[in-house]
Amino acid sequence: MWLMEILAYVLRLTIVIGFVIALMLGIIAWTQKSSRKKIIRYFRWSVKAAFLIIFMIPIAYLLGAPSVPVYSYLFDGSNKSLFMLPLAQSPCLVWLASWGQTIYGNRIVDPIWTLQILLAGGEAFNGILPVIGAMLLFIIPIFVLGNMFCSWVCPTGTVIDSFDRVVEKSLPKVEAKRVERSKRNKEMRAKRQGQLSNPLCPTCPLGRLSGRYGLVANGVLVSSLIGSAALKFPVFCAVCPIGISTRGASHLASIASITGKFLPVIIELWTIPVVAVVTSLREKRFWCKKVCPVGALLNVAGAFSPLFKPVVRDDKCRMKGCPEDCEDSKLDYCFICRQIDQKQCEKVCPLDINLTDHESLARCTKCLECYMACDSGAIEIKLSGTPDAFPALARLFKRKRKPKGAYNPEILSVFNAIEQKSATKLTKLKLDAQEFDLKCVTQNNVSGFVVRSFERTKELVDRYYAVKVTKERILAKDRMSKDEVEIPVSSVGYGLRSSSGIKTIDVSNKEDFIVLSKFRDANRVLPGITDKTLESWKHIVEERATNFLIARRFALPIPALSALAFYSDNPIVGVDMWSIKGLSNEEAKLQTLWFNSTPNLLQVYMLRTSDAWIEIHDYTLNELNFLNMEKLSQTQRTELMTLFREISASELPSILTQLEEKHPLRLRLDIAILKILDYDEAEAIKILNQLYPLLVEEIKKLKVS
């Protein structure tokens, strides 16, 4: 019987979820114009108000539920009730009265209570499966849509949000302190970027998904579950602000377990929801971010949601540079615009997510306030994307064990010292990174690449290489038959066949070529190629083409490896490389310098697993440190750009030779980077004189398999 009822609920919830998704898609599509964005705010607050009414008004009482007695331990009401109140919290009981008279209805809207009841042994063995099934009916929509409960449904959250609005409008001094405290917290988080977010369990997905903000909330959640198992009643439900303020069935049942009275309301417990609201004087949604175990649980579930992700477009964000479509781009008003903007999207975020630096959206409650606050159109709502939980889980399950004794303790000491001192100048970026593989442009064992020279042919699939290149034509030669063919420049794109053999960090006008459209002798170069295949190749290349490439897989000892990252004025792709999109030309040049520096080489070296090969996975890419552009002064930017122009076209020997011979260009680059990281020149030279021989010794030990 219970299985049929749960299946019926699944069908109803599927319809509801489909309706919600369709409605959200319609609203987002209709509100693309900034003048219409306020419709989303009106819609959300209407939904919040509707749920608040449903939770607060005594619908259950009107449907026949009994009144409940009110007691006070301060006013001598511990033995005799002071008065009676209608049982209010409707969602728990409307399921009972309207949706099939099932005893599992309240489990559907209260997963924390369900977990506590199960641990307390409050269900017979034959009732465990239906209870778990009922709880999952609440959790599954969170997995699909994200944690929308906290920002769209929760009655306590609605009251706290309303209180926050009053503080913003009526208490400017308090609001200024909240903004300053929020800014300070973000700066502290930036300093800890090199450290693990959860000091208690570094590899725990729960800690990775909820971060430091959720540490206390996770503690409350775990303590409640352990306490429920030990004391044999739902511990947290006795003090839950939602249950207290709405006279919910789960709260009253918990208090009844303690007092032995029939569903009692205790007046003194009302101080708990009041405190939950008033703590917002310190920070927006203080209770929700740092204490509430319901939010902690739902954030973990919501981190698996692939839908409705607010993403900052760097090319349109004023805080990242002057947008391309800005009318005043030639007047250099960027500083003024940034002072006006002040990261409005982050100011309105109730969970203080660092959106402009692409921080994880695992805690996002899909309130869409950031989308509505951005008047430059820099924030877009991606209808689907990679769930934020996947990188955390990938780190946990894909991380390989590093061999014992692999790292020289002196190298580790230098690495840790640099990481700690430079915490504010480095940051982790949520990069728009896409991988490119040779098979993307290969057919019938022939590659679409026409490499720049014969030396750059790597395998049998590399059939053609360029003999002569002009502005209009490429004269290519078949390395097997020695036949020559002319290829129009208009029929090719640009790419790097491999990171090995590239001796400069700026590969502009030194790239290899990729055939992307038909020309007269196309079938000689690519036998049997069709227009449809070339069109798909063109789409793949154009989608990934960028001006900043990072080598994805490489071995430090090999003589042909001179650099780990490359810049090009022409949008390019690279085989076994990450295409990093969303950076301006200047940012790409500066990050290219950083990624080829020895301080970065240290953190990349830590990724080595068993042999000499290092592979940068997508989940580790977002854990690597990059230069924090916002912390660089204009003078520092200018100095680095000057350095890039001076060394970018210079040919470099292998990385091992650079370190072994203390190559002048590497030395200049490393000193410049260390000075950016707050070292003076004397300190930088001392560190490098210590570090170079240590790295050379370690790299020479590695064996290329």
Image (tube, helix red, strand yellow):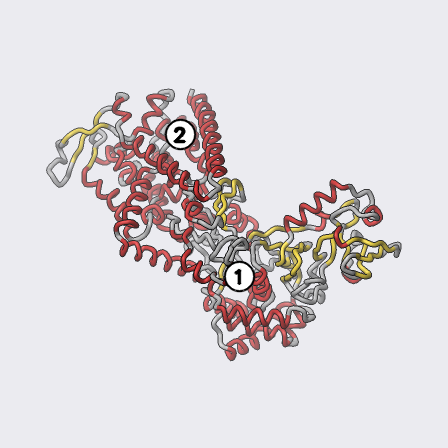
Left or right of 63? Residue 618 is right
| Residue sticking out furthest to the bottom | 682
Specify the quadrant of the image occupied by residue 620: bottom right
The three-letter code of the residue at mark 1 reads: Lys
Q: Can you see residue 468?
A: yes
- Mark 1: secondary structure: helix
Q: Is residue 265 above or below residue 297?
A: above
Percent position (x, y) of residue 685? 55, 78
Q: Which mark is residue 131?
A: 2
Percent position (x, y) of residue 615? 62, 56
What residue is rendered at 69% in x and 54% in y? 575
The three-letter code of the residue at mark 2 reads: Val
Percent position (x, y) of residue 83? 15, 30
Whichever of labels 1 and 2 marks the residue nearer the N terminus, that label is 2
The reply to whether the C-beta atoms of the residues labelled 1 and 2 are less than 8 Å apart is no
Percent position (x, y) of residue 92? 33, 29
Residue 698 or 136: which is nearer the viewer?
A: 136
| Residue sticking out furthest to the left | 76
Q: Is residue 609 above or below residue 542?
A: below
For disc 1, the marked residue is: 330
What residue is rendered at 68% in x and 62% in y? 508
- Which quadrant does the N terminus fall into? top left
Q: Is residue 485 above or below residue 65?
A: below
